[in-house]
Amino acid sequence: MIDRVSARAAVAALSVVALVAGCGLLRQAHQVPDELIPVFQAAAAAYGLLTPAQLAAQARVESKFDARAVSHAGARGMMQFLPSTWADYGIDANRDGRADPMDPLDAIPSAARYESTLAQLVEHLPGDRVSLILAAYNAGPDAVRAAGGVPDIEETRNYVSRVNTWAAAFADQL
């Protein structure tokens, strides 16, 4: 009987340890990686449209901060640039001689730069400016202009909502 009680106690203790450790991992997954904070801050300051928290939220929604992410559609890197968009807006922000969508030091400022162009393309539309920019990043500026605002596309509406939710969660960290 003591062996069963001891075994149950050990299992319970291990469960508590796993739960506590899991909470720590969950908490870490809900934070912006420390090394990227100055990159998001600099990109937001350089282009002045989205806040650092909003840019970080985009990276979280796009790739969960995974610089090696590649989507089924061929979007690459943390900020999920399609090759054609990268060709037009990708910059060598870290000045290493190569503009690389898989390098967060290039991708984050490139996303902020691209969003400054998107802002100009949707500036005449009614609605929240940030939501329009986010929708254009997700669905493309033509879809936003054709809809006269955030298009009634479930993926795009969810994207805007998720970015806004993550931005609120990251506001204190950035």
Image (cartoon, helix red, strand yellow):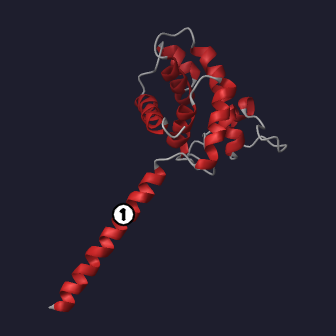
For label 1, the residue is: 20
16 over 145 or under it: above or below = below
Furthest residue in direction left, as rendered: 1
Q: Position of residue 24 (x, y in %)?
A: 42, 58
Seen at 50% across and 40% down, the residue is 61
Furthest residue in direction front, as rendered: 172
Q: Position of residue 116 (x, y in %)?
A: 65, 22
Q: Position of residue 86 (x, y in %)?
A: 70, 35
Check the picture and name the quadrant holding the C terminus. top right
57 over 29 or under it: above or below = above
Callout 1 crowding tier (Cα within 10 Å): few <14, some 14–19, many ≥20: few
**Residue 8, quarter of picture:** bottom left
121 over 72 or under it: above or below = above
* Residue 101 in sight from this viewpoint: no
* Residue 29 in sight from this viewpoint: yes
Of residues 122 and 163, which is closer to you in this image?
163
**Residue 80, quarter of picture:** top right
Of residues 27 and 115, which is closer to you in this image?
27
Seen at 63% across and 51% down, the residue is 68
Check the picture and name the quadrant holding the N terminus. bottom left
Q: What amino acid type is highlighted by mark number 1?
A: Val
Seen at 41% across and 22% down, the residue is 152
- What count of labels does the image hold? 1
Q: Secondary structure at mark 1?
A: helix
Seen at 45% across and 31% down, the residue is 164
Furthest residue in direction right, as rendered: 97
108 over 146 or under it: above or below = below
Of residues 153 and 132, which is closer to you in this image?
132
